[in-house]
Image: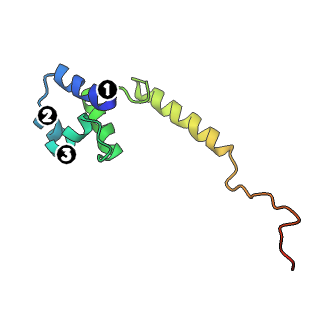
Amino acid sequence: MLGQQIRMARVARGMTAEHLAGTAGITRKTLAAIEHGSAAGSIGNVFNVASIVGVPLFGVDDPSELIALRRRGEERLALLPTRVDKKRDKDDGLDF
């Protein structure tokens, strides 16, 4: 679980919860929720805290690798149609 990894990394770095929360610009309560895996925290705060303590996101350590993954994802999304219409049967039950 990401929250557990964040807590272990924080402890391994000798950071107090108060120090990490202050560095991340969040409350101690928010950090506790993140470390306990609560879904109440914003994903931005979770990613920020993970980055501060050095927990790799998306299985990559190098930010340039993360950028490459994002670009490949964007390229794949560009291949998808922007809209999909459902095929209508000629006999849709309407009499007009």
Query: What distance separates the C-alpha of mark 2 from that of mark 3?
Result: 11 Å
Q: Which residue is mark 2?
A: 17
User: Is there CB contact under 8 Å for labels 2 and 3?
Assistant: no
Tag 1's secondary structure? loop
Mark sitting earlier along the chain (2/3): 2
Nearer to us in this view, 68 or 32: 32
Three-letter code, disc 2: Ala
Q: Are marks 3 and 1 in contact (CB under 8 Å)?
A: no
Circle 2 packing at 10 Å, graded few (<14), some (14-19), many (20+), is some
In the picture, residue 58 is in which quadrant?
top left
Lateral position of residue 45 relative to residue 91, left or right: left
Residue 24 visible in rendering: no
* Marking on residue 55: 1
Residue type (three-letter) at the residue carrying disc 1: Val
Q: Residues within 10 Å of mark 3 (few under 14, many from 20)?
A: some
Q: Earlier in the sequence, mark 1 or mark 2?
A: 2
From the top left corner, tell me how far across and down residue 72 is, in percent: 58, 34
Residue 26: numbered disc: 3
Report x, y in % for residue 4. 27, 27
Q: Quadrant of the N terminus?
A: top left
Lower position in the chain sequence, tag 3 or tag 1: 3
User: Disc 3 residue type?
Assistant: Ile
Residue 59 vs 19, above or below: the answer is above
> Can I make out residue 2 in this image?
yes
Q: Residue at x 25, y 35 (%)?
A: 36
